[in-house]
Image (spheres, helix red, strand yellow):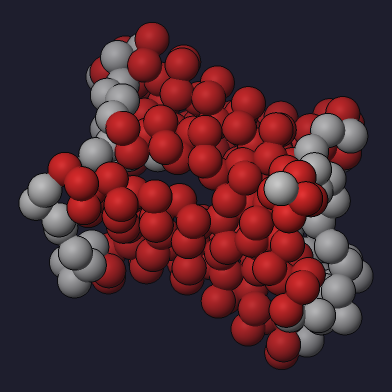
Amino acid sequence: MNFFITILTIKQIPNLSWSSNDPFNFKPKLKTFIYLLFGLILFGLGETLLITANQGVSPWTVLAQGLSFQLDLSIGITTFIVSIIVLFLWFPLKQKPGLGTLLNVILISIVIDLSTPILPYPKTFFYQVVQSLIAVLIVGIGSGFYLTANLGPGPRDGLMTGLQKLTNQPIALIRTVIEVTAVVIGFYLGGVVGIGTLLFAFGIGPAVSLGIFIVMKFFK
């Protein structure tokens, strides 16, 4: 029980020996850069596993999908629009973009494109749900690595860390509120919600906290 309480009450991204001192650092140490890439690749693989599980996409994709229906635009364009809006929300939160922000947008998309044809497509409902849970866990662990690198978070993670600093609430709570809000708005606009979507919305907060805990404990 104490283990779960510890995870759910984590409030800060750790500053480890390999973390960058400046999020706006475009020439990080090799070890920092490797951990950043590793985290982003895990993140992309987790997103792909959620897609191929075929039980609902992530909350932000639901939001982009709902906007695409309302604005009669492609989901790619609305995903870009959502990212820009979220980045604008960074300014009052005093968040800084960096190398990690740029690579988040580029590398995760590449990993999804490359891994979609080769990752499992389970046929039964049970294995689809299991794969969705594994996907959320992998995204959380990947987030722990790339956020700890401190080279700039992705748009949604930057919103999470900014709100955490502003409110001083646990990361798990902040992330869950953000994801559930995205789902509710996306569903209202016409986006499709599945079990995988709900698992991601309510599970990603604790999963990110678990990822941060694993990094702090085993990758100092």
Residue at 84% from the left image edge and 62% from the top image edge: 14
Q: How many marks?
A: 0
Q: Where is 180 relative to 138, above or below?
A: above
The answer to whether 92 is drawn above or below residue 215 in the figure is above
The quarter of the image holding the C terminus is bottom right
Q: Quadrant of residue 71?
A: top left
Is 69 on the left or on the right of 121, as rendered? right
Work out whether residue 199 can be spotted.
yes
List x then y, in percent, for residue 95.
Answer: 81, 44
Q: Nearer the viewer, residue 107 or 149?
A: 149
Q: Left or right? Give the position of 142 relative to 96.
A: left
Name the residue nearer the viewer: 42 or 3: 3
Residue 60 in view, yes or no: no
Where is residue 94? Give x, y as percent.
86, 39
Name the one closer to the observer, 33 or 145: 145
Q: Quadrant of residue 98?
A: bottom right
Q: Residue farthest to the front? A: 1
Q: Residue at x 69, y 40 (%)?
A: 172
Eyeballing the image, is 201 above or below 183? below
Q: Can you name the residue that lies furthest to the bottom here?
A: 30
Residue at the location (46% across, 15% down)? 185
Question: Where residue 173 appears, x then y in whole percent?
Answer: 70, 33
Q: Is residue 118 left or right of residue 188?
A: left
Q: Residue furthest top?
A: 188
Please name the residue shown 54% across and 44% down the image. 204
